Image (cartoon, rainbow, N blue to C red):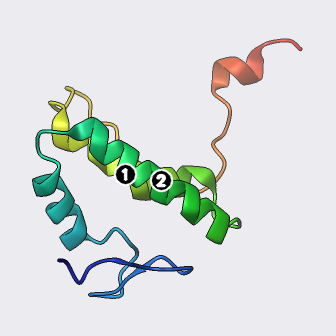
């Protein structure tokens, strides 16, 4: 049993007080779900839903990166151009979308 469980409703780690899931818990989850990436995504998705209810002021992209964004890299080879989950707020529309007539 890990001491790095979530402390709700603030979603900090019970073991190290970092935002949950903390780096230690991520390592544990990667090992626990090594052969079951879909199960890991479902497990964390359920926590994501709870976190959105507890922290409605937090942008959805930030919570997605925090709860699910890190899982993909653990199971897929890295592309030549690495995309990182860095959502901090609303994304700007692409240049092509801005330039199109309405």
Label 1 element class: helix
Q: CA distance from mark 1 to mark 2?
A: 5 Å
x then y, percent, for residue 83 = 34, 37
According to the image, label 1 marks what residue? 43
Q: Is there any visible trace of residue 7 in the rendered image?
A: yes
Decide: marks 1, 2 in contact (CB < 8 A)? yes
Q: Is residue 63 above or below residue 91?
A: below
x then y, percent, for residue 56 = 70, 65
* Circle 2 residues within 10 Å: few <14, some 14–19, many ≥20: few
How many numbered discs, if any?
2
| Quarter occupied by the N terminus | bottom left
| Quarter occupied by the C terminus | top right
Left or right: 12 in relation to 38: right
Task: Identify the residue at image location x=51%, y=80%.
Answer: 8
Task: Identify the residue at image location x=28%, y=87%.
Answer: 16
* Depth order, front residue of 98/85: 85
* Depth order, front residue of 69/92: 69
Return the residue found at the far right: 102
Label 2 element class: helix
The quarter of the displayed image where residue 22 is located? bottom left
Q: Is residue 41 above or below residue 17?
A: above
* Circle 1 residues within 10 Å: few <14, some 14–19, many ≥20: some
Which numbered disc covers residue 46?
Answer: 2
Return the residue found at the far front: 1
Q: Is residue 25 above or below residue 17?
A: above
Q: Is residue 18 above or below residue 51?
A: below
x then y, percent, for residue 64 = 49, 50
The quarter of the displayed image where residue 76 is located? top left
x then y, percent, for residue 6 = 39, 76
């Amino acid at each position: 049993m890990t001491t790095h469980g979530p402390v709700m409703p603030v979603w900090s780690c019970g073991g190290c007080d970092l935002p949950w899931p903390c780096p230690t818990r991520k390592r544990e989850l990667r090992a626990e779900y090594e052969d079951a990436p879909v199960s890991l995504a479902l497990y964390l998705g359920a926590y994501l839903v709870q976190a959105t209810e507890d922290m409605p002021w937090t942008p959805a992209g930030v919570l997605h990166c925090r709860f699910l964004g890190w899982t993909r890299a653990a199971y897929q080879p890295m592309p030549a151009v690495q995309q990182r989950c860095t959502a901090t707020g609303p994304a700007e529309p692409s240049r092509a979308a801005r330039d199109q007539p309405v």
